[in-house]
Amino acid sequence: MLKAGILTIGDELLMGQVIDTNSVWLSDQLNKLGIKTVFKMTVGDTPMEIEWALKNTENLNFLLITGGLGPTKDDITKAVLFKYFKSTPVSDPFALQMIENFVKSRNGEMNKLNINQALVADNCKVLYNSCGTAPGMFFEEKERVVISMPGVPFEMKEMFSNTVIPELKLRHHLSPVLYKTILTTGIAESMLAGLLSDFENQLPSSVNLAYLPSPGIVKLRINLLVETTLENKELFNRLFEQLKLLVRDYSFGYDKDTLEEVLALCLKTSGKTISLAESCTGGHIAASLTKIPGSSEWFKGAVVAYSNHLKTKLLDVSDSDIHSFGAVSKQVVESMAKNCRKKLSSDFAIAVSGIAGPSGGSTQKPVGLVWIAVSDSNSVVSKQFLFGENRERNIIKASIAALFFLLESVKKS
Amino acid sequence: MLKAGILTIGDELLMGQVIDTNSVWLSDQLNKLGIKTVFKMTVGDTPMEIEWALKNTENLNFLLITGGLGPTKDDITKAVLFKYFKSTPVSDPFALQMIENFVKSRNGEMNKLNINQALVADNCKVLYNSCGTAPGMFFEEKERVVISMPGVPFEMKEMFSNTVIPELKLRHHLSPVLYKTILTTGIAESMLAGLLSDFENQLPSSVNLAYLPSPGIVKLRINLLVETTLENKELFNRLFEQLKLLVRDYSFGYDKDTLEEVLALCLKTSGKTISLAESCTGGHIAASLTKIPGSSEWFKGAVVAYSNHLKTKLLDVSDSDIHSFGAVSKQVVESMAKNCRKKLSSDFAIAVSGIAGPSGGSTQKPVGLVWIAVSDSNSVVSKQFLFGENRERNIIKASIAALFFLLESVKKS
């Protein structure tokens, strides 16, 4: 398999304020071309670390470099590349013309800095920049191709897509990697690993399974590590179907799906509407659903009844239920769901009541205890959950559990 | 100056799906400790690249490693570290106990994978994980310290802040960089730059001012680039006071403050309560406030009245107002705020109604138009805002504007 490294250059990327999005985008592109990114590295605008990276990645097929080509003083990538590749800097007339046109189109005037930007190595293929001033450079060694591109994301993306990819395709037969991701919830990573241990043990070495956990959700990514021949593809598909079956009770979608979007689609398809009665999630479920454009089609609204008083006043929960069973109880959460559905005139309602923490817990009802109910025109069902001690994650986990519970209910209806 | 490298491990970070936020956070922390991050590197869950990184960074003072410590098979960092440092793996009884407690608190059962997580090197200092199962390890060589931490961001952050920093301070005199941050809202970055241009032009070269924008908020960070002598400190403080005065109409806090926390403190101090009537923000304001522990003290609840029907039914907005002026209007939003305050029995209420987009706009009322009202026992006041075309950012910007509007009102009362 072809291997690439990505080197992003810029002091600002090491100061802890700016996120390097170039390397994320590039590794996604490379992945789709069947080129494996084996590392990403970020260094400052200092010759030493750039040289070091060039010298220590000779075993790769490709080294993609972004940044450090601007006209200001702190950008020294070009000088390091000239030295490393023993190049003579020459002014490229076509690049110079493009820079002049670019500067003039913005009513600017050419200065020494702009003129210097047209300097490129005599032993590289010049990558012209159609969106900015700095040209890129394409160097070929025996084993490795080194590509230097600007750091401005839209300039880099345009150059990579329209100039670099065609060059790579001239040199290599590129076959995209086959992979699929299954999204699961309601099961911890270690439990999932237990459930899948037999499956994993019998996986051939040509197929890899990875667990990608985030609060409340574990993504399972299965990918083929070898060329996508017909035979390999069939093997991959067979294994993927096996995996799907093994985790069917916990899966809600694939690849770039989100739980909210899957639920939204399901509601739109079935023509059903929902409303929410949130206590411990405090509006988090409503916010996650209304992020989706067009949510007003199926989302009626929510009552965030944080105090017991509002549970009574806005959701007609009986004082005696709250008194007898507590606000975090099967009785209260079911009553919240039933009454919410009626008051907000929706087909389904979710209610959530729990102890998010850090305070408010007791031995009988510890922090992390959450009751969730789903109500439709026929019935109301509820479940008890026990999450952890962290308030923020309890809110996220309770929200995901509630949405998954609702999704399953809507599917069954 | 002390130099550090950051190594983040995980196949998922090289697939172009997941953004590595750990290294951004860590380099920010290091920066504040006066340690320079000279590079960041990401490699996959493969021994070769991890070994390579360990071998090629011996010139650094610190190598911080995150990720690759989970219980599943794809995590192999520990094996590489054992080999590199010629360690014998031993089960740490205290780590094992912590893992057991953690698993049991979630009603799980210990399995082989969990038990293996307690394996650590015999020649390291164990870094206990108070938020998860995987312990970290702290290795010391002649020149370099190598620190392995979990990849889950909150586990890593907790471990770094509470365990790693004290260890580093034992070994090095760390002289933090002097800096302060002023948080502003309600003014765009370019306007702020205009307002501060005279101030910036007269700044000495020993002081730097940076603009750190995020949707709805611009952070201004002023920092001293030279040693913190008494004289330099006095100069820095004088400039900071000047800056504060210049942006006083837009600032709501400093450094790590959040708008929600500043508002929470203000409400607690004044003993006032609030409630919300959200339309286009869809629960986002409620969710951002209830993230704060103890918010039930001052937050009564919210009505997310997404449909006009619910504005009428739950918030007693008159049908004729909606019909005459539209749901996004001064009349309707003021009525929402007034009635919300009464119905939810709070001292203050905010109401927000707008067009988040992408659809629903018109020439007269374009996408991005938002009305916000604040009501107290004496009066109701409202303001019109025009944000942009992006739904997600409109929701965030409207939420921030509403909280700032409320904060100013509570302060005046």
Image (tube, coloured by chain):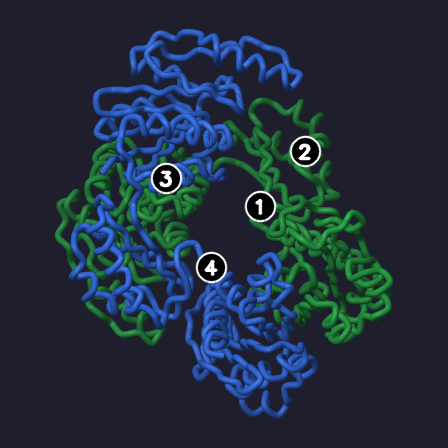
Chain colours: A blue, B green
Q: Which residue is mark 3?
A: A27
For residue A81, above or below residue A272 = above
Asked where in the image residue A44 lies, by quadrant, the reply is: top left
Residue A230 location, x and y as percent? 22, 49
- Which amino acid type is shown beneath numbered disc 4? Thr
Same chain for mark 3 and mark 1? The answer is no
In the shown orientation, is residue B96 left or right of residue A388? left
- Which amino acid type is shown beneath numbered disc 2? Ser
Element type where label 2 sits in the image: helix
Which residue is rendered at x = 31% and y = 26% of the image? A170
Q: Which residue is mark 4?
A: A258
Residue B30 location, x and y as percent? 42, 40
Which residue is rendered at x = 42% and y = 30% of the image? A160
Could you give the CA–CA distance between mark 3 and mark 1, rounded to whole angstroms?
Answer: 34 Å
Do residues under tags 4 and 1 come within 8 Å of each other at their CB atoms?
no
Res B271 visible: no
Q: Nearer the viewer, residue B169 or A159?
A: A159
Chain letter for mark 1, please.
B
Q: Earlier in the sequence, mark 3 or mark 4?
A: 3
Q: Residues within 10 Å of mark 3 (few under 14, many from 20)?
A: many
Q: Residues within 10 Å of mark 4 (few under 14, many from 20)?
A: few
Asked where in the image residue B193 lies, by quadrant, the reply is: top right
Chain letter for mark 4, please.
A
Circle number at residue B255: 1
